[in-house]
Image: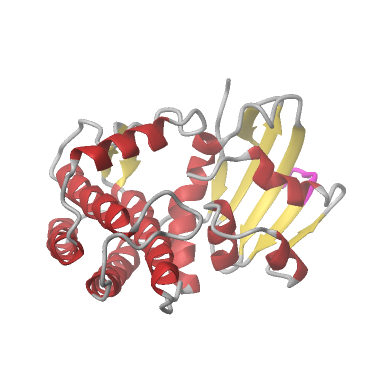
């Protein structure tokens, strides 16, 4: 299966993503420290707050290892659609016995501080090995920012607390992750599908993709596509990660599709799996 993505205007700005990562890490630690019990269940999830705290702390510690030159994968992202990420993430949770949330919040604060210290002054284009995959340093931090934003939202919902995802932060995440769409292609739902998209994040990233019978390939700039999609960054982030149905954003104009086959816009979520 040939998988590729045509990308324009996707570079993640290093100082912006480091600033956002530090700010959201501080907010997330404060939220964790406010939790009264690790056993509070996350809505629509098998995890509880303690599990999420472990996941985020361990993940940040692995990022510290990656920026220090580690190449051994902490998680298996080789076949996300096939479940490798979910299986290895569950294994890592079982291997870590700590569930005291204040302790895990301190680990997260320490690891995020070290991560920012070790990336200060480094180029966002520098390549690192993230879970066994070569990625630009700024993109890896953008992926980490997604973890903080989305799991922070999960914890806040469990605690009935407010949690804000800023549009600028969502744009940073999408700039890092949309070029990796090929990792999220669903081989079952894209079999026999022939569709091309111009996907535009409002105020940010723009990607051009073509799905052709299970393959996702580059389309040159300026070529016609079947469907154009204009997306509010926060709405797209939540829909892409399975945190929200697409229908309310569609009905409220936060996700808009047009072109010769506009109905393909609502089908896009079927062609991808939530990471």
Tell me, yes or no, whether the highlighted magenta stretch contains residue 226.
yes
Q: Residue at x 54, y 64 (%)?
A: 204
Is residue 77 visible in this depiction of the protein? no
Q: Main secondary structure of the magenta part?
A: loop
Q: Is residue 109 left or right of residue 216?
A: left
How many numbered circles does the render carry?
Answer: 0
Query: Percent position (x, y) of residue 214?
Result: 66, 26
Q: Residue at x 68, y 42 (%)?
A: 270
Q: Residue at x 22, y 54 (%)?
A: 57
Residue 92 or 214: which is nearer the viewer?
A: 92
Query: Percent position (x, y) of residue 25?
Result: 26, 67
Tell me, yes or no, whether the highlighted magenta stretch contains residue 188.
no
Is residue 56 visible in this depiction of the protein? yes
For residue 34, which quarter of the picture?
bottom left
Judge whether 141 appears above or below 89 on screen: below
Q: Is residue 192 left or right of residue 1?
A: right
Query: Which residue range is magenta in the image?
Result: 222-227
Q: Residue at x 15, y 64 (%)?
A: 113
Judge whether 130 appears above or below 110 on screen: above
Q: For the N terminus, which image quadrant? A: top right
Query: Percent position (x, y) of residue 235?
Result: 59, 65
Judge whether 81 appears above or below 114 on screen: above
Query: Percent position (x, y) of residue 228?
Result: 74, 54
In the displayed orientation, state which residue is furthest to the right: 260
């Amino acid at each position: 299966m040939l998988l590729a993505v045509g990308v324009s205007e996707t570079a993640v700005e290093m100082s912006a993503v480091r600033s956002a990562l530090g700010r959201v890490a501080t907010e997330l630690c404060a939220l964790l420290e406010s939790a009264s019990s690790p056993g509070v269940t996350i809505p629509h999830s098998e995890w509880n707050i303690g599990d999420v705290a472990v996941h985020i702390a361990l993940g940040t510690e692995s990022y510290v290892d990656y920026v220090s030159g580690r190449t051994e994968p902490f998680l298996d992202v080789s076949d996300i659609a096939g479940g490798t990420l979910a299986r290895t993430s569950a294994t890592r949770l079982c291997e870590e016995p700590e569930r005291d949330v204040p302790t895990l919040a301190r680990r997260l604060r320490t690891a995020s501080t070290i991560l920012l210290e070790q990336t200060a002054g480094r180029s966002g284009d520098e390549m690192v090995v993230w879970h066994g995959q070569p990625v630009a340093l700024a993109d890896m931090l953008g992926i980490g920012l997604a973890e903080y934003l989305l799991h922070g939202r999960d914890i806040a919902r469990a605690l009935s607390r407010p949690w804000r995802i800023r549009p600028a932060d969502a744009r940073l995440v999408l700039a890092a992750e949309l070029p990796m769409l090929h990792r999220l292609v669903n081989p079952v739902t894209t079999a026999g599908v022939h569709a091309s998209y111009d996907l535009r994040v409002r105020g940010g990233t723009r990607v051009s993709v073509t799905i052709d019978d299970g393959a996702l390939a580059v389309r040159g700039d300026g070529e016609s596509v079947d469907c154009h999609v204009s997306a509010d960054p926060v709405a797209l982030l939540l829909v892409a990660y399975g945190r929200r149905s697409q229908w309310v954003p569609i009905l409220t104009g936060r996700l808009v599709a047009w072109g010769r086959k506009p109905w393909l816009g609502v089908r896009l979520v079927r062609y991808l799996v939530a990471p």
